[in-house]
């Protein structure tokens, strides 16, 4: 099972241990690839539309026409059981790809192109935190699918 997560930027030092923790936990369940793409520009010097357009190009280059699930503030909120069901169904179809927007969000074009949009919460998270939360939910989802206890 291959899962790819495409996200602008990189993981900062203060979140690296959580990132590594979940990458290690997920190894037994799937072949996970995190694809970091370049940020669209300096938010202090470049307009939001230019930044979102630049990030869209980077993300589309990585997608290569594949369908994807978008983590989106305006997506549908689902619980962990629904997420595990989505995970199981998508993996039966083949590979799975998630896209997370950058610091300024996601372009409307990518929002329209997404196969499914899910929201992690009504709260707004940084793209780095969204990645960590997605990794945790992937781990939890695989534990649910395999009827395993979550707490380790």
Image (spheres, helix red, strand yellow):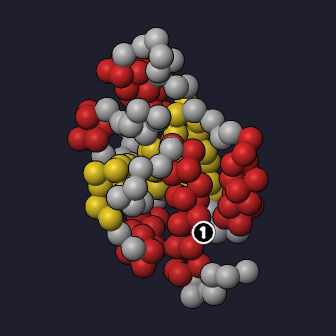
Q: Image point 52% across, 80% down: which residue?
A: 145
Which residue in the structure is indicated by mark 1? 139
Residue drawn at 51 percent across, 44 percent down: 126
Res 84 → quadrant: bottom left
In which quadrant is the C terminus drawn? bottom right
Residue 60 image point, x, y percent: 41, 31
Image: 54 above or below 3: above
Could you tell me which secondary element the residue under label 1 belongs to? helix
Give me the residue at 70% from left, 56% from top: 18
Q: Is residue 122 depicted above or below 98 in this figure?
A: below
Report whether residue 28 is seen: yes
Q: Is residue 89 in view?
A: no
Q: How many circles with numbers are drawn on the protein?
A: 1
Using a 10 Å C-alpha cutoff, classify the residue at mark 1 as few (fewer than 14 neighbours), some (14 to 19) or many (20 or more).
many
Percent across and percent down for residue 48 are: 36, 22
42 relative to 86, above or below: above
Q: Where in the figure is residue 86, as x and y percent of width and height? A: 39, 68
Q: Nearer the viewer, residue 109 or 101?
A: 101
Quarter of the image containing the N terminus?
A: bottom right
Residue 81 position in % (x across, y down): 42, 79
Horizontal side, residue 41 vs residue 139: left or right: left
Q: Residue at x 68, y 53 (%)?
A: 19
Q: Nearer the viewer, residue 15 or 143?
A: 15
């Amino acid at each position: 099972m291959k899962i790819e997560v495409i996200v602008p930027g990189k993981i900062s030092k203060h979140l690296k241990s959580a990132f590594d923790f979940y990458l290690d936990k997920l190894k037994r369940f799937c072949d996970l690839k995190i694809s970091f793409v370049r940020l669209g520009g300096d938010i202090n010097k470049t307009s939001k539309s230019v930044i979102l357009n630049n990030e869209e190009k980077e993300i589309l280059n990585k997608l290569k026409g594949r369908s994807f699930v978008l983590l989106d503030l305006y997506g549908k909120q689902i619980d962990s059981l629904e997420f595990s069901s989505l995970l199981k169904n998508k993996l039966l179809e083949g590979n799975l790809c998630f896209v997370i927007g950058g610091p300024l969000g996601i372009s409307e074009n990518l929002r329209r192109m997404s196969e499914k949009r899910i929201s992690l919460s009504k709260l707004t998270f940084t793209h780095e935190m969204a990645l960590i939360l997605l990794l945790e939910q992937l781990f939890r989802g695989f534990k649910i699918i395999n009827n395993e206890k979550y707490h380790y």
